[in-house]
Amino acid sequence: MLLNRESSGERWRKRRDGKEKVTGELQYLTDMTAEGMLYGRVLRSIHPHARILSIDVSAAEAYEGVMAVITHHDVPGLNRFGIATPDQPALCEDTVRYIGDAIAAVASTSLEIAEHALSLIKVEYEVLETITDTTRALEESAPRLHPQGNVLHRTQVKRGSTDTALANCAHVVHQVYRTPRQMHAYMETEGGLFVPEKDGRLTVYAPTQHGYKDRMQIARILGWEEERIRVISSPIGGSFGGKDELNVQPYGSLLALKSGRPIKMHNSRQESVRAGLKRHPMKIEMKTGIDEYGHLVAHYVRIVADTGAYATLGAPVLNFATEHSMGPYRIEHVDVEGVSVYTNNGLSGEFRGFGGNQAIFAMEGQMDRLAEMIQMDPWEFRLLNRRQQHDPGPLEQRILQTNGLEQVMEALAQSKLWQRRLQTPQDHEQHHSIEIMSGMSEQNSVPHPPWIKRGIGAALAMHGAGLGYGIDDPAGGRLALNEQGKIEVFFSYEEFGQGLIATLEIMLIDLFQCEPDDLSIVIGDTDRVPHSGSSTASRSTTMAWMALQRLKTPFLQSILGIATEITGVPSEQLTTGKTGIWLLNDNLTVVNESEPVITYLEIAQYMSEAGKQNELIFDTEFAYPTTPDAVVGGHYLYTYAAVAAEVEVNTLTGHVKLLDNYHTVAAGPVINPMGFLGQIEGGSVMALGFTLTEDAVMDEGHYLTKNMDTYLIPTIKDMHTSLEVEAIEDLPEGDTFGPRGIGEIGSVALAPAITAAIRDAVGVWVPHLPVARELLIQPIETWQAERVSPR
């Protein structure tokens, strides 16, 4: 299926939340207010690494308008948080480890008063050595940032005899790759509203990707039972992994309890930069060898990830990068080691792609370099070495076998964009001349000068979904007919722009042939929804689909049985449809299209009067599909993608423009075409920034990038002028897992496709991201001597 903005069809529906979003009427959680609320602000460390000698909050407490001040002494429970490894202080006791560390927090009647109150808090420090380099952090003489040392986590994958095999290879490529500290750059920064209720409970309105995990962590900090806390976690103004971890929740909760009043917190962009999560910067060294025929023989990898001051999900990110550093290829001899290192840099954590972006950039770079070394077409080289359908996964674990890898590789090879690469330079120039004459593309409105070079590159990705073996990955859901006569579905997932609500609506319409007005969708509220796991790891659509498949039959049997009880019509002659239950003829089609036999509302009223509402509520619980092999972090379900990119390189300035972009994705049935296209397009724009412009630069533990004015995310002018997405919907016969998640796959393979296109255009290999423009600037005599560019 080819997807584009001009496509039409019954699945291309308006989003339930679309009008409110485009008109600005939608109330996000950070827009909320409450009567009598106070404003909360956090005092953060001014040093990346220091010992706290004293904290004096007396002046702040005495300041008019200040209603509460908290330090670590006010934390009644565990003064630590971290979704996987709770090692980050809610409020620091004796040591600060990065400039975002929280020392105290205040609540006051205005933001201005709160800001001034922070300046009244006196903190005395003893400055310690700042560890900003992972090499220094790993030295024996380095200060220990945590009691266990400076290593958060290590990984290792070994099979065969890699050293010997590399020594005997006909060709070896040895390269070190580096990737940046990318910001999530969501429009809505971290924040929320924290309301102490009259019944002694706490209601938290705060954007997060996992309301139940937030509830668990807040409860630990407060020393409460989880049930005393209600977390409402949707809608969210963007996350991409950055709000999967606690951010302001500890401070808002503690201040609400101490003051007894609602607390509103909302980070400024500068504070979000300072304290928020970033993508792990990684250094990845690879030595990859082939025989004289181009077969991969041996692969040596060393990954060093800078996790920053605290763990958050640094260990699982390293697991994922390790797994994906071998790519979708067959390699007999493998030696991979990874280490995630604590430093005094800003926090690194979960981010769309989850370590796959860094690893795939490096691995695909190796494939291109090896192919060029033996003068083989890079796609033919990949075809020669790709995993076969019945091969195990990268960690030699059993996986669900599909033909997705072969399908995306074949689709890309046949794409118009990749076929253009096979043309001669003269044919390529002619193609662009035709574009100019036909007015197809604004950037081709005039013939490009000799310092403008064009190139095409491609990359491949095999991306695991779900949390992986050894990590609790629950799923489930609830389906009911509510008292208002609506078919109602409940999940603990969140809507943060990915289109989940629209996808759920389409699924329900498919199952019950109803209309949007017949539905109620409840998500992101721990008081109302069952625990169906996190909205992460490209898992939500798959899990919701599997849950609804389990719930469909009992719900239908029950509601049709009740319709029979009321009307006397046998249930086998009935079906669900618009507004209610309809009569079928012998051909199993609706007899009378004017009105139902009985409406959903009439059934709901009947059940209420009979005191039997609970008979139309159905729950299911299960776990995300996991490999049966005990390989920690190993995945079972994979999504496959192939990406081609055409770039234009200005060798006067080093500027790179993405002209054309082709994605083919094997992810099973497309439930929501607009959502599918939006995810791939959005992921590719995020990957464009990762590749060309984005890096939150630090110097000695301080951000030089303090705001969006010095952080370059792609704008509409930087985006590709052409995007084609081809969705491959085939699944093996008998597959019971339905659509695969595509929230990350659009972001993981564009970087190596772009750098391959740069190589094709100007002959320069790019090992470090974002691409340094100075690498691409060429002497004037170079292009003066050429009449036309290579591409």
Image (cartoon, rainbow, N blue to C red):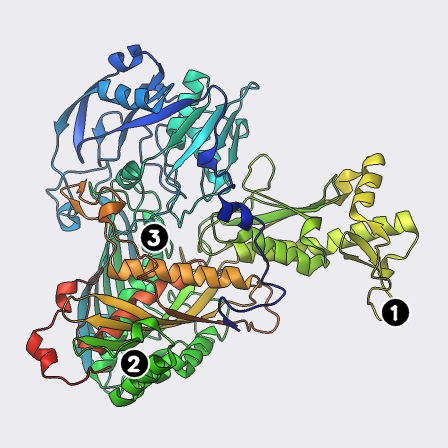
* Marking on residue 378: 2
Depth check, front residue: 369 or 300: 369
- Horizontal side of residue 443 vs 727, given as left or right: left
Label 1 vs 2, first from the N-terminus:
2
Image coordinates of residue 688 in percent, x first then y, are 31, 61
Q: For numbered disc 3, what is the local secondary structure?
A: helix
Label 3 vs 2, first from the N-terminus:
3
**Residue linked to disc 3:** 317
In the image, is residue 104 above or below residue 407? above
- Cβ atoms at labels 1 and 2 below 8 Å apart: no
- Cβ atoms at labels 1 and 3 below 8 Å apart: no
* Marking on residue 586: 1
In the image, is residue 451 above or below residue 356? below
In the image, is residue 259 above or below residue 577? above
Give the residue displayed 10% in from the left and 42% down from the top.
Answer: 141
Depth check, front residue: 14 or 441: 441
Q: Nearer the viewer, mark 1 or mark 3?
A: 1
